[in-house]
Amino acid sequence: MELRFTQEPIPELTFTGSALARNGFTAGMRVALQHKHPILYIVVVNDNTTWDTYCETSQHNPMLGADWVDDDGQLVIGGDWLTNLGITQADHVDAAIAPGIIIIRRRADGILKV
């Protein structure tokens, strides 16, 4: 999985690469975001009921979100999703991927902060 971090105008993390697709994050795939401090979980959503629930619930809960992988196969996460974790620079990012899930945490001074 390849990561690109940009700071301006807002912090933004772009995921690309074949590992993304191999783990279920293909173009157009719906994803649910859940912030459980100090971690952001991004999970693939395959069924309509779960998707509808996340879309509705995320309107009233800032710790939940619903998004999708772009048509070009990129997944872009930015703004409050990163700054709420304290991620404002590229060297703050610690991300891992497994089938159906991406986990993002903040690193501090090269050490994983948990």
Image: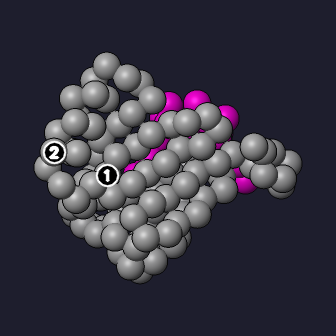
Which of the pair 19/88 is nearer the observer?
A: 19
Q: Residue at 49% x, 59% y: name it.
A: 102
- Check whether the beta carbons of the residues at disc 2 and disc 1 lie within 8 A of each other: no
Q: Quadrant of residue 86?
A: top right
The mark found on residue 42 in the picture is none
Does residue 58 lie above or below 26 as drawn? above
The mark found on residue 31 in the picture is 1
Q: Residue at 18% x, 55% y: name it.
A: 47
Queried whether the magenta region covers residue 90, the answer comes back as: yes
Residue projecting furthest to the top: 60
Q: Residue at 39% x, 54% y: name it.
A: 43
Pointer 1 local density, CA inside 10 Å: few below 14, some 14–19, many at least 20: many
- Residue 63, how many percent across, how many down? 45, 29
Is residue 8 rendered to the left or right of residue 31? right
Task: Judge whether residue 12 can be spotted in this image.
Answer: no
Which of the pair 22/47 is nearer the observer?
A: 47
- Residue 111, how many percent across, how many down? 84, 53
Q: Which residues are magenta?
A: 76-92
Distance in Å between CA atoms under marks 2 and 1: 13 Å
| Disc nearest the viewer among 2 and 1 | 2
Which of the pair 49/3 is nearer the observer?
A: 49
Residue type (three-letter) at the residue carrying disc 2: Thr
Residue projecting furthest to the left: 48
Residue type (three-letter) at the residue carrying disc 1: Val
Question: Which residue is denoted by mark 2 in the rendering?
Answer: 49
- Residue 42, how many percent across, how many down? 43, 51
